Amino acid sequence: MKRTQGGSPKRAEVLAFVGLGSNLGDRQNNIRTALDLVDSVSGLSVLGVSSFYECEPVGRSDQPDFINAVANVRTSLSPRSLLKALQGIEKRMGRAPSRRRWGPRLIDLDILLYGKELVLAPDLVIPHALMHVRRFVLAPLCELEPDVVHPVLGLRCRELLRRLRSGVSRESFSGQSVRVAVQ
Ligand code: AMP
């Protein structure tokens, strides 16, 4: 760990992946606005963004389809500070607090991977607990970085996606259709 001149500890920069999703309002615009806000946070910069994918909702089908994307970011924020920054952006964009799991949302920002770090806390799990069984995460992630390795499973993104397509891994509910890249 480095220290700045002022004495406060400075983290080394880490490459992380952030998942974005929206199924309310102008979905593409919501994703773009969120990306701009992510890039504007001190200690956080967006290096690349996948295409935008139109995806059937997972878990609950009684809601509009999502636009999903993945961004590759470079950050000097800790995992928890990154989570707080993403939650601040969700709030700032007007995401209403919802008790409904897998319900509709204006914007959803998730930390998928944070370098090779593992975090297992009540409010933060990295790698994201369901990323390996979600096509709407793996398809855009593979587009950006097919060889990125899931640090728990020890498998490359392309292999996780292949397993999901072939039915080797599956989520316990249906609704995994990722139809078109719309960007
Ligand atoms: P969601 O409804 O999908 O936005 O889930 C939000 C909740 O997931 C928050 O309470 C977060 O603390 C928690 N959470 C756990 N792991 C993660 C992660 N890797 N990225 C974002 N939120 C997470």
Image (cartoon, helix red, strand yellow):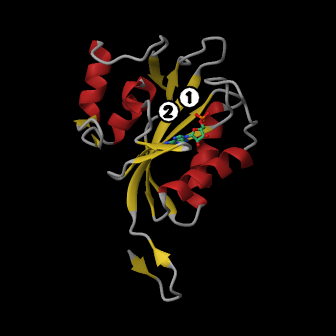
Please give left or right for residue 89 compared with residue 35 in the image: right
Q: Is mark 1 within 8 Å of ligand 1?
A: no
Query: Which mark is drawn over residue 94?
Result: none
Crowd tier of the residue under label 1, counting other residues whose Cα lies within 10 Å: few below 14, some 14–19, many 20 or above: many
Q: Which of these two is toward me, 105 or 7?
A: 7
- Disc 2 secondary structure class: loop
Residue 163 lies, with reference to residue 39, above or below; the image says above
| Amino acid type of the residue tagged 1 in the rendering | Ile
Q: Where is residue 123 in the image (x, y as percent from the top left)?
A: 56, 44
Quadrant where the N terminus is found in the figure: bottom left
Q: Which residue is drawn at 46% across and 17% down?
A: 179
Instruction: Tell me which numbered mark, 2 or 1, is placed earlier along the sequence.
Output: 2
**Residue at the disc numbered 2:** 52
Q: Which residue is drawn at 72% across and 38% down?
A: 95
Q: Where is residue 71 in the image (x, y as percent from the top left)?
A: 46, 45
Residue placed furthest toward the bottom: 5
Cβ–Cβ under 8 Å for marks 2 and 1? yes
**Residue at the disc numbered 1:** 67
Q: Which of these two is toward me, 16 or 78?
A: 78
- In the picture, residue 26 is in which quadrant? top right
Q: Where is residue 10 in the image (x, y as percent from the top left)?
A: 46, 74
Q: Quadrant of ligand 1?
A: top right
- In the picture, residue 143 is in which quadrant? top left
Residue 168 lies, with reference to residue 34, above or below; the image says above
Q: Where is residue 24 in the image (x, y as percent from the top left)?
A: 69, 28
| Amino acid type of the residue tagged 2 in the rendering | Phe
Crowd tier of the residue under label 2, counting other residues whose Cα lies within 10 Å: few below 14, some 14–19, many 20 or above: many
Q: Residue at x 48, y 60 (%)?
A: 78
- Disc 1 secondary structure class: strand
Please give left or right for residue 123 compared with residue 104 in the image: left
